[in-house]
Amino acid sequence: MNHSIKLRFLFAIATAFLVISLLSSIASKAAELHQTIRGTITDQDSKSPVIGANIVVVNSEPLLGASTDARGNFRIEQVPVGRVSLRISCIGYEEKVIPNLLISSAKEFILNIDLTESMVKMEELVITALEQNKNEVLNEMAVVSARQFSVEETKRYAGAFNDPARMVSAFAGNNTAAEGNNFIIVRGNSPKGIQWRLDGIEIPNPNHFADEGSTGGAINALNSAMLTNSDFFSGAFPAEYGNAFSGVFDMRLRNGNNENREYAFSAGLLGTDITLEGPIKKGGGASYLVNYRYSTLAILDDLNIVEFDGVGVSKYQDLSFKLRFPTRNAGTFSFFGLGGKSHILEDTRDEENEDLILSRGDWKADMGVMALGHRYLFGNRTYLESNVSIARSGTGGIGEELGDHNEFYTDFDGFFRNHTAKITSILHHKFSAKNKIQLGFIYDRKFYDYYSDVYYKEEGGLVREQDSKGDTGLYNVFASWKYRLFEEFTAISGLHVMGTGLNSNLAVEPRFGLQWTFSPTQTLSAAFGVHSKMESLINYFAVNTDDDGNEHMPNKNLDFSKARHYVLGYSNMLTGNLLLKLEAYYQDLYNIPVEDDPNSSYSLINSVEGYTTRNLINEGTGYNYGLELTLERYFANSYYYMLSTSLFESKYKALDGIERNSRFNVNYLGNLLFGKEFSMTHRSDKDKVLSISTKFSIAGGRWYTPIDLEASRAAGHTERVEALAFTERGDDIFTGNLAIAYRINNKRTSQELKLDIQNFTNNAAKLDQWYNSTTDKIEFSEQLPLLPILMYTIQF
């Protein structure tokens, strides 16, 4: 552990103990506290209100509960602060249990709950044990490779840093970038195959410091305080999801409190933010929810409180919001958005003389999306969801090198800019408890603008390599049908069609799924789907110059990358809180863009970001297959644990016909998570809780292509021996994360202090090689070192 890491660690520990001591003294004599739980119960398929549903706080004494009114609303007051479980029942619907809700003294707990209509009329399906099943996702068309996650999990899991992308790396089959970015690698696929969605629409990469074409970054711009329960898909997605190849984040914004104003403030190493919510007008039903965050390190640097000794300071800010307007006769309108800006000044210094700067860069990125949504119910069986949105994203900057006369010269200057206008509409109709259909369409109008200037020694200055702009349309139409043959058997079928105005390419994608609950605790499921993804526009419009100086766009007619997903799953609720889950999968990858050269090993299947000017054709192939196991003990009786393991192979072929390891073929993944809460007060006074969470992860090393040192010297940047593509491998990776949190509820406030330490063993696996032109050496990128993150949050 180097000196700077030691100082950061000791400072975080000392501050944590100081604040904990102060908070403990403040709340040492708190009385028993209460809060209100309220919300709305709706039919899962039609979204119509469920009238007369009974909601009971399990094991409450005296019994606490309520029934829903004509609008499906309910309210339970005087609920003790702490963890409680709810049981929801209604004649004609399957009973539902929602366990271990964390109730705080500062914030009302508001729920929107869907119930599934029972196929046996005038009866309730009775669940005798207090069970929960996270196989039950929000999207009822999904039967395999799907997982619902909560906001609390993003906070609870060690190393998640309140980031959904880092949190899902704990699930079987998912891997993240050990360098520190939150790229998600699903089942051996490139992270470029991930799609991010927010409240039903596809959005640009919602991460700070993101590069063109990537789906990850250093820090997520969407604060988890804005989210409600959401879904993550890792294969064979329902027909609703198009233009996704490997995985889908389907995130949902929560609604603001429409009765009372509530506030939250957080400060930590990753940012300082404030959240505001409340009614737009008292008694009107409309609400607002707003979060703003600014980089804490930037604040400290601007105020000259901390001296960073030339280290690049990550400066970023983000804003997210949601306004909701329910009406009596015109449905419910929502206006929501997300925006983020990031900026960093970096430099490389001489190893022997740290005052000598060898290179420096000024890099920027931004993203933003705004949308107007509308939901309208046509009676009790049909509803229409529609959205119109605009989005933008950009990334680029300027890089400089130290020249022969100790003067800096610009060796790169470039910037990407993307804009998208989108309209989405989905019609849902429930024929009966057995049958539901979805019909939808999505149209995108995409625009891009890009320039890049690169320094060439032989030219004696910058040469403009790219200066282009373009636009095209992308359309998606789909249909899904859910058929429940009987209570225990569900069949899903669907079709998704995607095309673009750029060329005549069309993707027809059938989707099928089956789920059979053959015993009260055991389920078999299977699914098949064809999935396609369009590359970022720069890959289609990139200009290439031939030997005669003629410019052309070689890839304008490039087709979509495609994959056939086959999944077989088995799950068993071993006890009321313990789930065993197995999934086997095979993914047949085809139509993959590869270089049009019979001697080339190049395939876009291995790219993470950026673009290429190589001549590409859709003749590449590949496959992924594997087995995943999850043993998860849901949070109950103050503790949880999860063991997830994956064994898999990921191979590809380019035009040279050689089967090779893909870049992401790490072969095995393993995670062990454990967390425990300790009450720090008397049994009747549950207002102080200490929690400890751990996560231990192992993964095989990534494959990389060895560097051609002489060619790199001549070019001034990394050049690789492509004939030996992905024949060398980085170190196996071990990561240990530890989180310690102390939570205190006072009469009108709730406070939490959390210390989250990533890679607390300071493991330093070597991951990949790169050529450093300033030192003329081949160097290794390494695993992110020990990183302690301290955060304080107060709600009031």
Image: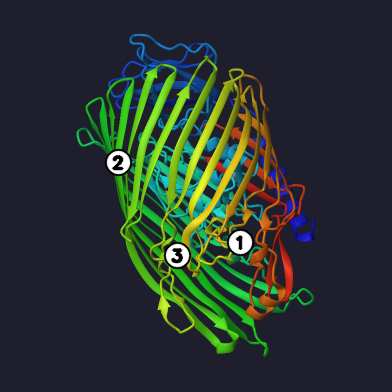
Mark 1 and mark 2: Cα distance apart in space: 49 Å
Q: Amino acid at mark 1?
A: Leu
* Residue 250 image offset from top left, x and y in percent: 44, 42
On screen, residue 22 versus residue 390, left or right, reads right
User: In terms of sequence position, does the residue under pointer 3 or pointer 1 come before the other?
Assistant: 1
Which residue is rendered at x = 74% and y = 49% of the image? 732
Q: Are marks 3 and 1 in contact (CB under 8 Å)?
A: no
On screen, residue 92 versus residue 3, left or right, reads left
Mark 3 and mark 1: Cα distance apart in space: 40 Å
The number of callouts visible is 3
Q: Are marks 1 and 2 in contact (CB under 8 Å)?
A: no
Up/down of 204 relative to 416, above or below = above
Which residue is rendered at x = 48% and y = 12% of the image? 63
* Residue 223 image offset from top left, x and y in percent: 50, 47
> Is the residue marked by circle 3 packed among few (<14), some (14-19), or many (20+) residues within 10 Å?
many
Q: Nearer the viewer, residue 637 or 735?
A: 735
Q: Is residue 693 visible?
A: no
* Residue, disc 3: 539
* Residue 601 image offset from top left, x and y in percent: 59, 62
Residue 557, image quadrant: bottom left
User: In terms of sequence position, does the residue under pointer 1 or pointer 2 come before the other?
Assistant: 1
Coloured how?
rainbow
* Residue, disc 2: 440
